[in-house]
Image: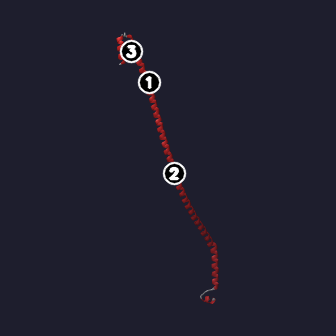
Amino acid sequence: MLEILGKVGFDWQVALANLINFGLVFIVLNFLVFKPLKKVIQERKEKIDAGLSNAERAKEVLQEASFKKDDLLRDAYKESQDIIGKAKEERSKIISSAGDDANEEASKIRQNALEEADMILKKADEDITYKAVGVILSGVEKVLKAKMTKDINEKYVKSLLQ
């Protein structure tokens, strides 16, 4: 078989040298290029996997934050409605209280006016009584000063009774 190969130009010594050269180049490339390249590729793969994992976690965190945001907005809306309801109740109380205060103040003013009117009526009554007494005394004095006869007295009594 070596003869056949020799006829085509195959030299086993050159083939052995080429095989040894290939083995040496392979070993050198394996230690100097392939292993570091394999290490760099593995690190890059780990970084990509970590990035994908982080992206997945970020997506989950974002979704969770979205749910929390919705819950917070819902709670804030409920709280705002409660505050608005309380404010409306407080407004009603204030308006009612103001109305009650106004009614109470009006009642006091009415009561003061009635008391003042009563005082004025009493004073007027006293003044009229005092003046009436004066007029009556004056009339009695005139009657007593005048000489009264029986006829004058009867006419005077009749005129008073009418």
The residue type indicated by label 1 comes to Lys
Residue in the image at 35% along x and 16% along y: 158
Give amino acid for label 2.
Lys
Q: Nearer the viewer, residue 77 or 130?
A: 130
Helix, strand or loop under label 2: helix
Q: Which residue is mark 1?
A: 122
Mark number, residue 30: none
- Residue 91 image offset from top left, x and y in percent: 48, 43
Residues at marks 1 and 2, CA–CA distance in whole angstroms = 65 Å
Mark 1 or mark 2, which is nearer to you?
A: 1
Q: Which residue is mark 2?
A: 78
Q: Does residue 44 appear to the left or right of 98 in the view shown?
A: right
Amino acid type shown at disc 3: Gly
Residue at coordinates 37% horizontally, 15% vertically from top-left? 157
Secondary structure beneath dot 1 equals helix
Where's residue 40, x and y in %?
60, 69
Above or below, 75 against 146 in this view is below
The residue that disc 3 covers is 139
Q: Could you say which quadrant of the image residue 25 lies in?
A: bottom right
